[in-house]
Image (cartoon, rainbow, N blue to C red):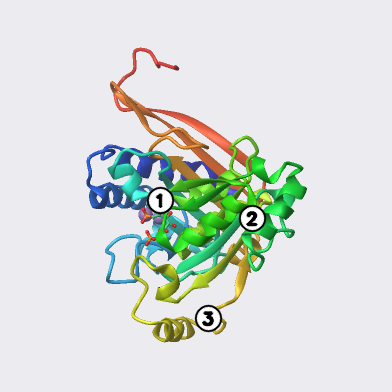
């Protein structure tokens, strides 16, 4: 799967990032999102594949493009037989967030990316549009930290696994009222907190890279983003656990349905009978082959944002593969005109 898709999915996230970054700092989050969706979909539909969106822009009929269940790729077209040997192609599932951190783009802040994860059919957990309690940490702490333990206990374990004092640990937490106590607990334990307004996918992935000075992600963010983060961390061997949150009182912000009971019933309808189950990275991204791709829209810890120059743009992407066990940082110069000289720095 990697051989045929690797380069193409880089272009998919690059195109989404370039389109969205044109709206950077313009205060128009919906447009920054919409153009990313359109660009991602257009490039995706040029790939020789039979893809299906399992995490996308919303349920069928509610979002017109990249909606859950939408089929993408040349080989899903009615006239596919003219282009592809349909029976030979592996069916793949795709989780997308064409603009992860729409507010960050709209307000010109760091940390937004165009992201996607791919696996063979059934290889990604089709997370409902709910919230998810998340715990991400470096590979050295995988299986040692535990989402069921307190933040204080996990910080002590992290400190042992990483061989650094709790005071030397940095935990990313989304700046939300629901995390007031969590933030206090982390600070009391002695660790330092980096509060982010949006963009917890980037924070989760940073945990798996030494040198980012991010050692854990704790707290509640969106469930679909949890699956995309898990896909990357599964490939990198990092720690990721996620637990769906269905109680509106716990979340305190955002739309999550009317009641705890109603949400549990909705989960049941989707076949999720244990609403409290804790999923690890291998369960959220269980496929034999998993690929993650992300491209910076605005500058971030792992990747630079899109930089325009006269007649082109430069992007930085990250492609992670479970198959080749690689994390490739890809630096691309996109030329829209005949170049005279390519400016490297
Ligand atoms: O920041 C985020 C928003 O994603 P997007 O809508 O694609 O721009 C995500 O990283 C978060 O995981 C999540 O969506 C956020 O925590 C939602 O929670 P809230 O803002 O408190 O309702
Ligand atoms: Mn998002
Ligand atoms: Mn988004």
Res 272 label: 3
Label 2, ligand 1: CB separation under 8 Å: no
Name the quadrant where ligand 1 sits. Answer: bottom left
- C-alpha separation, residue under disc 1 versus residue under disc 2: 22 Å
User: Quick one: which residue is furthest to the top in this view?
Assistant: 340
Q: Is residue 261 left or right of residue 217?
A: left
Q: Secondary structure at mark 1?
A: loop
* Residue at point 64%, 55% (across, down): 234
**In terms of image quadrants, where is residue 243?**
bottom right
Label 1, ligand 1: CB separation under 8 Å: yes
Camera-near label (1 vs 2) is 1
User: Quick one: which residue is furthest to the front in this view?
Assistant: 188
**In terms of image quadrants, where is residue 121?**
bottom right
Percent position (x, y) of residue 66? 35, 60
Q: Earlier in the sequence, mark 3 or mark 2?
A: 2
Query: Would you call the spot at circle 1 few (<14 residues within 10 Å), some (14-19), or many (20 or more)?
Result: many
Q: Is residue 290 left or right of residue 304?
A: right
- 13 and 109: which is toward the camera: 109
Q: Earlier in the sequence, mark 1 or mark 3?
A: 1
Tags 1 and 2 touching, CB below 8 Å: no
* Residue at point 72%, 42% (across, down): 165
Percent position (x, y) of residue 301? 51, 37
Residue at numbered disc 2: 234
- C-alpha separation, residue under disc 3 versus residue under disc 2: 22 Å
Q: Secondary structure at mark 2?
A: helix
Residue at numbered disc 1: 198
* Residue at point 55%, 65% (across, down): 124
- 18 and 263: which is toward the camera: 263
């Amino acid at each position: 799967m990697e051989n045929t898709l690797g380069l193409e999915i880089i272009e998919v996230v690059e195109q989404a990032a370039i389109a969205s970054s044109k709206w950077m700092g313009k205060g128009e989050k919906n447009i920054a999102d919409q153009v990313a969706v359109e660009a991602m979909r257009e490039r995706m539909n040029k790939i020789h594949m039979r893809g299906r969106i399992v995490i996308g822009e919303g349920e069928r009929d509610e979002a017109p493009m990249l909606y859950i269940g939408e089929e993408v790729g040349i080989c899903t077209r009615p006239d596919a037989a003219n282009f592809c040997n349909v029976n030979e192609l592996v069916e793949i599932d795709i989780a997308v967030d064409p603009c992860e951190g729409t507010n960050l783009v709209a307000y010109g802040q760091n940390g937004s990316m165009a992201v996607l994860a791919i696996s063979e059919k059934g290889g990604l957990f089709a997370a409902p549009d709910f919230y998810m309690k998340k715990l991400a940490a470096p590979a050295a702490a995988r299986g040692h930290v535990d989402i069921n333990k307190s933040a204080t206990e996990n910080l002590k374990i992290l400190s042992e696994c990483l061989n650094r004092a709790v005071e030397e640990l940095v935990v990313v937490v989304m700046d939300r009222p629901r995390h007031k106590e969590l933030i206090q607990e982390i600070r009391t334990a002695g660790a330092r907190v980096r509060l982010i307004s949006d963009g917890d996918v980037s924070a989760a992935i940073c945990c798996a890279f030494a040198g980012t000075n991010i050692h854990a992600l704790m707290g509640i963010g969106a469930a679909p983003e949890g699956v995309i983060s898990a896909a990357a961390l599964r490939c990198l061997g990092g720690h990721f656990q996620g637990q769906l949150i269905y109680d509106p009182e716990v979340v305190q912000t955002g739309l999550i349905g009317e009641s705890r009971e109603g949400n549990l019933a909705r989960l049941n309808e989707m076949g999720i009978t244990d609403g409290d189950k804790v999923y690890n990275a291998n369960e959220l991204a269980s496929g034999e082959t998993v690929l993650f791709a992300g491209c910076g829209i605005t500058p971030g810890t792992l990747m630079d944002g899109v930089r325009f120059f006269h007649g082109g743009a430069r992007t930085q992407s990250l492609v992670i593969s479970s198959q080749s066990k690689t994390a490739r940082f890809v630096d691309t110069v996109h030329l829209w005109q005949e170049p005279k000289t390519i400016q490297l720095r």
